[in-house]
Every structure is written in structure tokens, then in C-alpha cells.
Amino acid sequence: MDPKSGRPRGQALTAPARALDLAAMRPWTRSPQLLKLFVGQHVANGLGVAAGVMIVAVAATVALGFAGGFSVTLGAIAASIGDFPAPLRDKAKSMSAGFALALAAVGLTLAASHWLALEIVVIGALSFVGGLITGLGRWALATSMQILVAMVLALGLPPTDLRGEFGLLALMACGGLAYIAISLGVSRLIAASDRRMMTSESLRELSNYLFAYAALADAHADLAGVYGRVIRQQAAFSEQLQGARALLLENPRATPERERLAASIGLMLDALDALVAAQCDLPDLRGLPAAGEWMRRVGVLVRATALDIQHLSLDLLAHRAPSLPKDHHLARDAVRREGLRLIAEEDTPADVRAAVGRTLARFDAARAAIRRLERALGDTGEAEAALADVKLSAFRPQRSFALRLLRPHLTPASPVFRYAARLALAMMAGGIVAAELGGERHGNWVLLTICVILRAGYGLTRQRRDDRVIGTLVGCVIASAAVAYAPTWGLLVVQAVALAVAHGFARLNYRLSSVGASMMALVSLHLAEPDFTSPMIARLTDTLIGAAIAHLFSYVLPNWEISEAPKIAQRLKDRAAAFADIALRRAAPDQDYRLARKDFIEALAALSDSAARMGDEPRGARRGLDELSAMVVAAGVAAAHISAMRLDAMQPDANEPLEAERAAAGPTLAGATPAPGSRLAASLAGFVAAANAYEKAAVRQADLREA
């Protein structure tokens, strides 16, 4: 009998124990994807945008009649495109600047509308500016769309004289400013709710990471594929945290609740650190028959932890002091019992005992970090302790409209410049096609399809092309049914819901967003002209034309991922060297370690995103994809060993040779032969070898192009 587990050595779980496991697994049928789709800031944001636009539209129509109200509504729509969750000051600045650029785009488009040649030139120039402005950062995509969509809306307006143009701009300005005022007022009122929702979504991404992580315990799963999924989900978590930092680290000590939510960012990363460290020995242990039962329980533990954090994310939305489920320790206890049994077995090899012991300690550290996260979300004192030595302003991203930030992109070698030129050429071609089709009912929909589909990367363009076509088809069918059978008040409700869906899901699920956009356009057209025949076929035709143009121009001035290989590889190697140098320094300040960790995680996320984009490119452009995938896995393994070395060294009874490992890490990352017997040095050498292979693949591709 095993004294620790109370059952014969090597015996599998009893039937009642297995029944308990199965009962615990029933809640796992809850879909993280559905939860992400229907619970989040995007839902509240979409509903808020729809409500704001409808308020402005109804008030303007009552006061000015349909014609005047329509112009005011266009202004509100143009302003609403830039309305996404952000700190109040950043939102006010970006929405105002974006709307000013949108008004300028409308004015230029109206002025050029009397001469077709000039109109095509203006379309190209405004599209180039809209593409170039994305060089300010990912947040500037909304500003880019404000320019492009406002221009397209102006192209659909009937011709008028100079006085009419100024009158239209004045009414649009009133509508946009009214919407911005409403949006900022509502944002101030619900700011606390926004911060809680942002924290909840960050916890949910951490939970999704754990769902992917659990496959590491499955001996039958392909290890490289599992690592790829784990790192992709880690990249999604990193992207979510970038948004969370912007919102939660604005004046974080203003109130106790702000302080608690701000502390959650660092504590989530502490938990991630321990979980990454726990990966080190799992690849070796997962293939050992003697460890089969223990690995099965590890999988149960990781999935149970994912559900615990998912529960915490939802509980945060309902309670001031959220809590983990009361039975959250059961899976951990089961893993510990089986692990101690393995360690106590006389025939267990020494290296396996050591690996199991290390992994148990690292999972304990992860659970402790999660418990501390739970306490900090409800206890200001715990949050203050977590933030004691951290300078939070160093972690908060800053938005800027400084034109000097665009200077590096004013060259044909820049991916941003190439995207801007590609977009301008595609929109000019779309303008010519629209002129041949005749009538604003065709022109603006073709151009709108091009500007919302065409993106900097080929893979994203292809995905949005498919989503746009399918979404338009579904939206047209739903809208046609609504127009045929719904009363006028029902159509107003459909219009509002469609606007909420179109805006709320624009970033999360473009197919759903396209459904909403098509419904809104067709219902709005029917309400404006009830006697006009439903243009369902025309909309589908225009969508297909616009999608075809966007697809063709995605091959013009392309920027394939392989061309960025040397920079991506070198940047990640530099971040890895900095991370190892700080992490392996016992006396390194916590602030320095957190910054180095953040930089490395973001660089790894960029590498993972690059691999995903390359996988969506045409087969002939996927040069070096295998090498890139290998580099992603090697970087994840190296990160696990760096985190594990630091975590083990920080234990009270640790005797880890941290300084010796640090001294060996630098030369290894520089290409020197790794120190014998060092698992950390071996993992770093593997990462360097993978990075070098990727760089060589990029050079081979460059040589092929020149030849």
C-alpha cells in the first residue's frame, strides 16, 4: 500500500473516483468560443454605438425633417466608427481627430464629384492617407476606416452646389459632435464597468490558454502542434493584455477598485510565468508509461484550473469580491497524491523523480499566483502589496498622432507604404468600375467592400473577402424577409440591432459584422424609399465585384512574411537575451524583470502571428514556413526554461546555480557551444539554431527573387 495515496502502488483510479472525475468534466461542455462571442465589451460597445446613433438620428429627423436628419445621421455614423473601448482621454483624442479627418475626406470628395477624373484622383489620395495612417499603430485602424467610410458615404450622395456642400458638412459636423458628446458622457458613466469587463476578458483569455495547455499532458497529441496552439493562445492573451494595460493603467491608484484591477495584470502574468515554467518536463514525462496516470491527472488539473479562472472572470462581473469555486483544490490534491506516489516508488528513475518534483512545485506556484490574483481582486491591501515596487506608467502604451511617427513608412520598402499604395490603386480601380456601372447605389457599395476587405496581409484579406461575401448573402436574406413582413417600428428595431452587430463584432467576427452591415444598409434604404425595389441581387453583385477587386490587388506590391524574417528573428533573439539576462540575475529588480518579460512575450506573440499569416499566404510564398514554425516552438521551449530556472531559484530552499547559468546564457545566445549538462543552455542553443535556420531560409528566398 502507498502511505500517501492510501491504495496499492500503481493502481489506477477506482470506479467512484473516475465517476467523480467525469462529474467534474460535465461543465467543460461550456464553449469558451461562445462565451467569448456573446459576453464581452464588444457587445456593450455595439449596443452603445447603436443607441447613440439612433438618438442623434431620431432627434435630428424630428427637428430638421428627413433630409436634414439624414445628413446629421451620416455625421454620427462617421464619428461612431472610431468609438471603441479606451481610456476617456485617448478616446476623446482619437474620435475627435478621426472625425475631423472624416469631414475633410467628405469635403474633398464632394468638391471633386463634378469631374470624374479628379474624383478618381481624390479617391486614390484619400485611400493612400487612410492606409498610411495605420503606421501609427493598431489602434489607428479605426481612424483609417473613418476616413475611408466617410469618403465612400460622400460618393453615394446626390450632386449639389457649393452652398449645398457646405450645408451638408455643417449638418454632418453637428451630428458627429453630438455623437462624440454622447459617447464620452456614457463612457464616463460606465468607466468602472468597462474596466471590470476588460479584466474579465483578460482572465478569460488566460483560461483559454489553459484549455490549449492541457493537451501537453496527452501523450497521443502531436507535440509540435500542441506547442503551436499553446503559443498562439499565449499570443492572443498578450494582445488582450495590451488593451487591458491601456485601460487599467490609466491613473490606477485613483480608487481602490482601480488599484485592484490594475494589480490583476501583473498577477495574471505571474501565473502565466509559473505555468510556462511547468511545461519544461512535460514533453519527457508524457511518453513514460509509469507516469501515464499522473499525466492524465495533470490534464484534469489544467482543465479544472481553466474552468476556475473562467468562473472567476464571470464572477468578477457580478460581485465586488469575486472568488474561485470552493472545490478548486481537488484536482491539485489528486495530482500531488499521484506525484508523491511516483516519487516514492522504488523503481522510479531518479531523473523522473526529480522531474515530477519540479513540475509539482511549479504547478503549486501557479496555483498560489492564481489564489493571490483572487485575493487581490477583492482585497485592496493585497493589490497594494502586488504593486508596491512597480512603476505602472512604464507598462502603459501611449497613443500619438505625431506625424514624425510616419516618417519611417515614407519609403516603398515599408510594409505600411506598400499597403497604402495597394489600397489606393484598388480603390481607384473600384471607382472606375463603379462609374461604369452607373449610379451611386452601385458605386459606394463596391468601394465600401474594397476598403473593408483589403488589409496589409494577404491572409487577412482572403479571410475578410470570404466573410464579406457570406455575411452579405446572409444579411440580404434576413433584411429582405424583414422588409417583406415586419411593420415600420419593427424595421427600426432591426436597423438598430443591425448597427449594433455591425460595429460590435467588427474586430471579433467580421462575418457577423458583415451580416449586420448588409441588414442595416438594406433596411435603411427601404425606410428612406419604401417604393424602391429591394436591391438584394444588386448588393450581392456589388459585393462580389468589390471582393474580386480587393483579391486581385492583394497581389500588387505584396509584402510576404518571409521578407520580414531577419528582423523578426533578430528582434526575438535580442528580447530573449535581455529576458535571460534579467531573469537569471537573482537581485534583479522586479520592475526590470516584468518589463523584460513583457517585451519577450510580445516579441514571441509577433513571431506567432507572423507564422499564422504566412500559413494563409499562397503556397508559392510560404518559403521558410517550416523553419518559422520550428522557431516558434523553440522560442516557447526556451522561455519555459528561463522562467523555470528563475522560479526554482526563488524558492526558499533553492540551491540553483543562477549566476553560472546566466554567465553561460549570453554566449549560447551569441552562437557558442552550450555548456554540457545545462538544460537551459541546451534550450537556448535550440532556439538560436532555429532562428538561424529561419534567417537562412529568408536569404534563400531573397536570392531566388533577385535571380
Image (tube, helix red, strand yellow):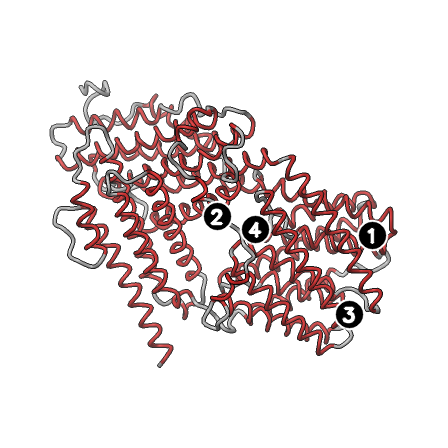
Within-10-Å neighbours for mark 1: few <14, some 14–19, many 20+:
many
Numbered disc in front, either 3 or 1: 1
Few, some or many residues within 10 Å of mark 4 (<14, 14–19, 20+): few
Of 540 and 377, which appears nearest the observer? 377
Residue highlighted by disc 3:
439
Q: Which mark is residue 507?
A: 4
Which residue type does callout 1 highlight?
A: Gly
* As drawn, 652 above or below 285: above
Front residue of 225/677: it is: 677
Ranked by sequence position, the earlier of labels 1 and 2 is: 1
Farthest residue, direction bottom: 707
The residue that label 2 is drawn on is 397
Give the residue displayed 61% in from the left and 56% down from the top: 143
Q: In which quarter of the image is residue 530?
A: bottom right
Distance, label 2 to label 4, CA atoms, is: 20 Å
Q: How crowded is mark 3: few (under 14 residues within 10 Å), some or many (20 or more)?
A: few
- What is the number of the mark on residue 69? 1
Helix, strand or loop at label 4? It is loop
**Distance from label 1 to label 4 (Cα)?**
29 Å
How packed mark 2 is, by other alpha carbons closer than 10 Å (few <14, some 14-19, many 20 or more), is: some
Which numbered circle lies on residue 359? none
Front of the two marks 1 and 2: 2
In percent of width and height, residue 508 lies at 55, 48
Report, in whole angstroms, how far the alpha carbon at label 3 lies from the one at label 1: 23 Å
In front of the other: label 4 or label 3? 4
What amino acid is at disc 2? Pro
In this view, the residue in front, 477 or 447, is 447
Q: At 84% across and 64% down in the image, what residue appears?
A: 164
